[in-house]
């Protein structure tokens, strides 16, 4: 691989403030985080606590809004109008921004959660809601979204900065969607396999899908699911492997 194609730095993010109380263990390995802001998890107290922790570790702070559905942890689509959904998402993000202002911190990005994230990637109606949400905030606020998704293409057309996200601990379908959690091979459990999965994407700008096919992909940020039981171990091993390859985390 030629030097001009080498990735020399990458962001690592995790979803936090979701009630697991493991942020202190994860934060030293992260360069950005996505804070649950009341839709699927979280409240004013958890947001304030995680913001302070992120500030201490100089980790960029993002909002992680979702369908307003704590009962299902935001993992199921809701029968809700686009207007009501947008209103809820704005309220969630604004709640986090209030806490950020109190700490003299800025909102770096927005990353939808769960079912909303997946639907915005593949369905125009939900992508439009996310774009409307992004337009409500300063142009400096970035969108975390996957390469090739409907929402990322729409964001680019609207002058919104997209940070292309990949998942370290999830397998991919040929259309670059994530393998459903109901599938036995959805999750990558082995830390060495997870590191190989990430390094392949960074070094070749491709992902090996569940079918064994290689598909083009862009990587700006790598997500480790904070609710995975081995999240801290995965982060330790992944960051060590990236450092060995001279890839900075920032």
Image: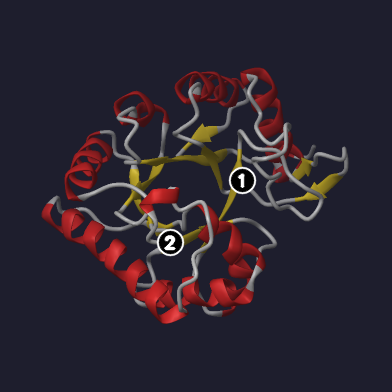
Q: Picture coordinates of residue 210 (x, y %)? A: 81, 39
Residue, far left = 102
Q: How many labels, in total?
A: 2
Task: Please say if 32 is above or below 241.
Answer: below
Image mark for residue 126: none
Nearer the observer: mark 1 or 2; the answer is 2
Q: Which tag, 1 or 2, sits closer to the chain's start?
A: 2
Please name the residue shown 57% across and 32% down the image. 247
Task: Report whether 28 appears left or right of 14.
Answer: left
> What is the x, y in percent for residue 91?
27, 68
Q: Is residue 8 left or right of residue 202?
A: left
Q: What residue appears at the point 35 percent right and 57 percent down from the top-left corner?
A: 39
Name the quarter where the C terminus is drawn.
top left
Name the quadrant of the N terminus.
top right
Q: Secondary structure at mark 1?
A: strand
What is the spatial separation of the Cα atoms under label 1 and label 2, in whole angstroms?
22 Å
Which mark identifies residue 67? 2
Image location (x, y in percent) of residue 215: 81, 49
Q: Nearer the viewer, residue 132 or 143?
A: 132
Residue 15 horizontal/vertical position (percent): 42, 42
Q: Secondary structure at mark 2?
A: loop
The answer to whether 111 is drawn above or below residue 205 in the figure is below
Measuring 70% from the left and 62% from the top, which residue is drawn there? 148
The residue sitting at 45% across, 56% down in the picture is 111
Q: Alpha-carbon neighbours of circle 2 within 10 Å: few (<14), some, or many (≥20)?
A: many
Question: Tag on residue 166?
Answer: 1
Q: How is the image coloured?
A: secondary structure
Residue neighbourhood size for the residue with mark 1, other residues' Cα within 10 Å, grouped as few (<14), some (14–19), many (≥20): many
In the image: residue 214, left or right of residue 20:
right
């Amino acid at each position: 691989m030629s030097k001009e194609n080498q990735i020399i730095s990458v962001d690592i993010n995790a979803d936090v403030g979701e009630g697991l109380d493991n942020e202190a263990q994860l934060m030293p390995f992260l360069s950005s985080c996505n804070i649950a802001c009341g839709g699927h998890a979280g409240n004013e107290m958890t947001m304030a606590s995680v913001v302070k922790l992120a500030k201490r570790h100089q980790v960029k702070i993002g909002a992680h809004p979702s369908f307003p559905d704590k009962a299902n942890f935001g993992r199921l689509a809701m029968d809700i109008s686009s207007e009501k959904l947008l209103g809820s998402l704005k309220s969630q993000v604004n709640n986090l921004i209030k806490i950020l202002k109190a700490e003299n911190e800025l909102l770096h990005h927005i990353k939808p959660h769960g079912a909303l994230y997946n639907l915005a990637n593949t369905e125009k109606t939900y992508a439009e809601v996310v774009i409307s949400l992004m337009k409500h905030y300063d142009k400096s606020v970035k969108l975390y979204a996957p390469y090739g998704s409907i929402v990322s293409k729409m964001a680019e057309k609207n002058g919104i900065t997209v940070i292309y996200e990949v998942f370290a601990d999830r397998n991919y379908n040929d259309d670059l969607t994530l393998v459903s959690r109901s599938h036995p091979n959805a999750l990558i459990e082995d830390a060495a396999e997870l590191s190989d999965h990430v390094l392949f994407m960074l070094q070749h700008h491709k992902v090996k899908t569940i079918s064994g096919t290689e598909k083009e992909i862009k990587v700006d940020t790598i997500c480790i699911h904070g609710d995975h039981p081995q999240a801290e171990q995965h982060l330790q091993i992944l960051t060590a492997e990236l450092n060995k390859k001279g890839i900075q985390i920032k």
